[in-house]
Image (cartoon, rainbow, N blue to C red):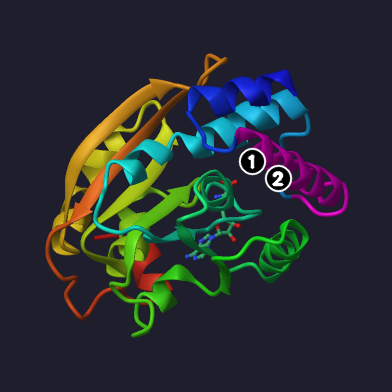
Amino acid sequence: MELLDKVLEYYKVKNPLVVKQLFIKYMNLVLEKNKLFNLTAIENENEFVVKHIADSLSLLKFIEEDNSYQNPVAIDIGSGFGAPGLFVKIAMPRLNIFLNDSNKKKCKFMNEVKECLGISGVTVVCERAEILGRKEEFREKFRFVFARAVDRLNVLCEYALPLLEIGGVFLAQKGFECEDEIDTAKNAIEVLGGEIYSIEKFVLPYSEEKRSIIVIKKLRHTPSNFPRNTKQIVKKPL
Ligand SMILES: C[S@@+](CC[C@H](N)C(=O)[O-])C[C@H]1O[C@@H](n2cnc3c(N)ncnc32)[C@H](O)[C@@H]1O
């Protein structure tokens, strides 16, 4: 896996030999399970390295830039088979990660991976993110929220922002063209206590895959009437 070596070097991942072994083991578990149960459309290993591993590791610099905690706590909402959260956790063991998905089979798989890889500081939470946002043990408890391929930004913000502590950062991974989505989400971001901090556009290493990361900071507490119930969030986005 020469490409994986190059990707780990590109992102300056520490202990690359250990991380590489864990990534390969994890990739094999995903590709094996994918034969029985649809986890990803990507079956080719090099494509997996770029579109899942490199894409996930593009979040690392935003976490590294924040010096508030030695062991920051992050939640990946709609994590599916664990992307991007589990890849980021493997590359940055000091991160404490919560992998959230509403789908029971996907959560079972993430728990299996956690056991197989034998890594600590990983908690799988099988629930809708907007329900977690109303629970005291999750509301405003996270330094980072990640989300990739979950929903449109105006809907996603009502899942994500209630979970962030003040000063925390929501990293929404999107395709290259995301301006319309951002425009539509401006009201939701304001109402929920956030502010767009930056929009990063880049090409994934060793590919022509273009991506954006929308960086949203939490500045104020989310009003207590949010998140609303799922039907209202989806049918009448803020
Ligand atoms: C297209 S998949 C993306 C999975 C993963 N993030 C990735 O990029 O490969 C979307 C996932 O979000 C989950 N999901 C959708 N809405 C959710 C919600 N409100 N709370 C938690 N999980 C949700 C679905 O069950 C599904 O596994």
- Report the residue at 46% width, 55% height from top: 94
Q: Position of residue 79 (x, y in %)?
A: 56, 56
Query: Over which residues does the magenta segment extend?
Result: 16-38
Q: Residue at x 28, y 72 (%)?
A: 140
Residue 50 is situated, as x and y percent measured from the top left of the image, at: 61, 27
Of the 4 image quadrants, the one containing the N terminus is: top right
Please give the name of the residue rendered at 43% of the width and 78% of the height, measured from the top-left corner. Answer: 131
| Mark pair 2, 1: CA separation | 5 Å
Q: Position of residue 67 (x, y in %)?
A: 25, 50
In this picture, residue 199 sits left or right of residue 99: left
As drawn, is 154 to the left or to the right of 47?
left
Q: Residues within 10 Å of mark 2 (few under 14, many from 20)?
A: some
In the picture provided, is 221 more to the left or to the right than 137?
A: left
Above or below for 60 versus 33: above
| Closer-to-camera residue (213/1) | 1
What amino acid is found at the position of numbered circle 2 in the picture? Leu
* Three-letter code for the amino acid on which mark 1 is drawn: Val
- Cβ–Cβ below 8 Å for labels 2 and 1? yes
The residue singled out by tag 1 in the image is 19
| Residue 24 found in image quarter | top right
The image shows residue 161 at horizontal and vertical percentages of 28, 62
31 in magenta: yes
- State the residue position of label 2: 22
Classified by dominant secondary structure, the portion drawn in magenta counts as: helix
Vertical relation: 122 (above or below) 144: below
Q: Which mark is residue 36?
A: none
